Image (cartoon, rainbow, N blue to C red):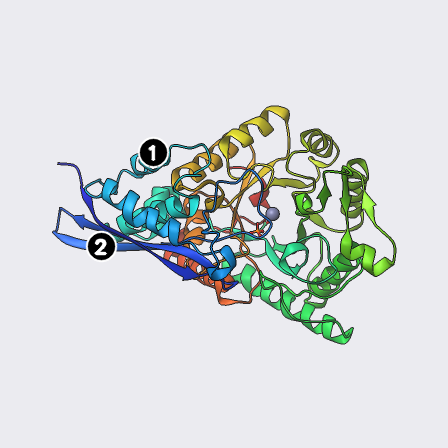
Amino acid sequence: MSAYLEIKFIHAREILDSRGNPTVETDLTVLNHCNGKCYTGTAAVPSGASTGQFEAVELRDGEPRYFGLGVQHAVKNVNEKIAPAFLGKNALNQFEIDRALLELDGTDNKGNLGANATLSVSLACAKAAACALSMPLYRYVGGTGAHLLPVPMMNILNGGKHAANTVDFQEFMIMPTCADSFSCALRICAEIYHNLKKLLEQKGLSTGVGDEGGFAPDLPDAESVLEMLVDAIKASGYTPGEEIWIAMDAAASELYNEKTNMYHFPGESRQKGGEVIRSTEEMISYFEELTDRYPIISIEDALAEDDWDGWQELTKRLGAKVQLVGDDLFVTNKKRLAAGIKLGTAGSILVKVNQIGTLTEAFEAVELAHKNNYTAVMSHRSGETEDTTIADLAVAWNTAQIKTGAPCRSDRVAKYNRLLRIEEELGRAAEYPGLLAFHVR
Ligand code: PGA
Ligand code: ZN
């Protein structure tokens, strides 16, 4: 008889995320028929602020409580619609479970049940199954081959929608490719973070942090941010562009204005006392200039989510030199990724499980990327919880890169700490890819 982990109990509740907004958490309990014991997996769903328009639907109540952001309807969908339909199913059939969630929802974008409802069940199911088999999640999901720790794409300076400062690009990150282990990489990043804090203090700039834990000072433009990062890397004793690289998330969909067909830079405008706007062509040239002058290895959402022509041109001009990551462009959706691959657009997909709403679909996006020589970067959202599932998924799926914020705020640090524990558990089998993270394996 094949193993049977019978789903016995599913219960969702409303909890808070790192911004103090409600989100869905689900407990799923299975009965292991081999030993008669029950096991529970719990998963909490993250939430974005610079959300792509093509993401699966995050169901919000739209009622006065929590300013419309309550998730009681999504919770009810888990408890009253999903639970009764899923009791008795075998939690080992993750693919089947996720397909059943899609069928029960019946829409293209999880608009019925809510991707927050479906994702919480999908992840809790995998976690319960792993627990019932006494396996860590990365091993259960990734199998015997899972041994690659990700290079952190660590966000140390926040702007855009994640902070109230004048920095218009959303994220400035560091990637320690010179480290020989994940724990060493994490130490290097934390040291650079602390040195950046000292440099900001010396200049009398704010050391308050944004949603992802990076500092959020008022700086006039991207160049001044990049200068600060280079100085912090050097102050820590490392060579920028050899040992430590810089990555950026422009989150350009947030800067794009449909009416003018231009990218507007409100912070830079305020700092410079005149409106700063850039066309698609000017954006591409701007990124060319920045990558010529600074040690930038990766740029995410350099252009807006529907500017396919611009993305193609950008890829032609910069794709061989830097990793171009599609976040709002691909929204962890294999159909949008397939369209991008066909057009030769970008070279990497950002993977956010709640953009798509089930574990299987997120896996399919990673698989499609890797098959086509695109890299995949596992990612948190700006609204997070203490849930560390993405750390395990990065190892399970050999993404080799992870974006999960600064070494600050427990919602971010929890993922890094989970990776430290995974590395320790893997022992000599653990591998840190360094620069190889930019090649698909
Ligand atoms: P979000 O930002 O979670 O607010 O969407 C993260 C990102 O754009 O990568
Ligand atoms: Zn992004």
Q: Residue furthest top?
A: 342
Front-lying residue, 432 or 414: 414
Q: What kind of residue is marked 1?
A: Arg
Q: Nearer the viewer, residue 181 or 406?
A: 406
53 sits to left or right of 278: left
- Determine the residue positioned at 46% across, 40% down: 356
Disc 1 packing (10 Å; few <14; some 14–19; many ≥20): some
Q: Nearer the viewer, residue 74 or 131?
A: 74
Q: Residue 39 has which mark?
A: 2
On-image quarter of the N terminus:
top left
Residue at the spot of label 1: 99
- Residue 335 placement (x, y as % from top left): 51, 29
Q: Tell me where residue 341 appears, x and y as whole percent.
A: 58, 28
* On screen, residue 387 above or below 336: below
Q: Is residue 326 left or right of residue 353?
A: right
So how many labels did they put on this image?
A: 2
Query: Which residue is at 59% across, 53% downward?
Result: 153
Residue 404, placed above or below residue 377: below
Q: Residue at x 34, y 42 (%)?
A: 143
Whether 262 is drawn above or below 372: the answer is below
Element under label 2? Answer: strand
Q: Position of residue 255 (x, y in %)?
A: 71, 46
Q: Is residue 430 visible?
A: no
Residue 338, given in percent of the width and then of the height, sits at: 54, 27
- Between the residue at mark 1 and the residue at mark 2, the CA separation in whole angstroms equals 23 Å
Q: Is residue 86 visible?
A: yes
Closer to the chain start, of discs 1 and 2, is 2
Q: Which disc is residue 331 wearing?
A: none
